[in-house]
Image (spheres, rainbow, N blue to C red):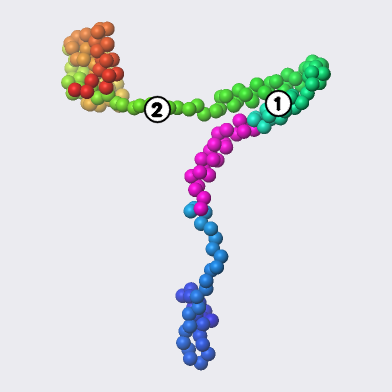
Amino acid sequence: MDGGGDGGDREYTAGTGCAVGVQIQHSRRLPDFLQSVKLKYVKLGYHYLVSHLITLCLVPIMLIIVIEASQKNPDDIRQLWFHLQYNLVSFIICSAFLVFGSTVYIMTRPRPVYLVDYSCYRAPENLKAPFSRFMEHSRLTEDFDDSSLEFQRKILERSGLGDETYVPEAMHFIPPRPSMQAAREEAQQVMFGDIG
């Protein structure tokens, strides 16, 4: 046998020095689990199991209680009631446990969220209000002193709004003209997707 580091299996025949290759066939091959089992379904099953663990535990308990109750006759139920009356502490503890378990289940269960439609309204270009125009309009209304205007400027710079911000049409007048009619028109524009 060759003790070299080439990793191949070679055998030398006696006296000739010729190398004869030996190939090893693997008759048993391990299954490729990535191909045979869809791991996506395993992950979904695990997620379902963890999400509904309390339900999956409570259903067998409820079934056992229903089966046991259906096998009782009225005399047994009356005797159980008398037993519960005299063992008030155990009855209260069991009731508290059931209420607590139900509350935990209701509070921690995932709530379904359905997205029916998503759209984003883009106002007409004439409603765009860059910082410079907004600050100029604020100055021209003469409702603000210099310190208030400076405060407004700082708020605008730090608010995350940019020069691509839009304001309602009523805010473009000097002084602004907010009215119920203007609010209705703005709502109608935004809600009924005004594609012009």
Q: Name the residue under label 1.
A: 66
Residue 128 can be seen, yes or no: no
Q: Name the residue under label 2.
A: 115
User: Horizontal and vertical percent for residue 122?
Assistant: 24, 24
Residue 109 can be seen, yes or no: yes
User: Taking 186 as reference, is 53 left or right?
Assistant: right
User: Horizontal and vertical percent for residue 188?
Assistant: 27, 15
User: Taking 38 as reference, is 84 left or right?
Assistant: right
Q: Please say if 104 is above or below 142.
A: below
Q: State yes or no: residue 52 in magenta.
A: yes
What residue span does the magenta drawing correspond to? Answer: 36-57
Q: What residue type is labelled 2?
A: Leu
Viewer-proximal residue, 138 or 180?
A: 180
Q: Please say if 174 is above or below 22.
A: above
Q: State yes or no: residue 112 in magenta.
A: no
Q: Which of marks 1 and 2 is in front?
A: 1
Q: Which amino acid does label 1 sit on?
A: Val
User: Horizontal and vertical percent for residue 106?
Assistant: 57, 24
* Cβ atoms under marks 1 and 2 closer than 8 Å: no
Residue at 48 percent of width and 80 percent of height: 21
Task: Give the farthest residue toward the bottom.
Answer: 15
- Mark 1 Cα-neighbour bin, 10 Å: few <14, some 14–19, many ≥20: few
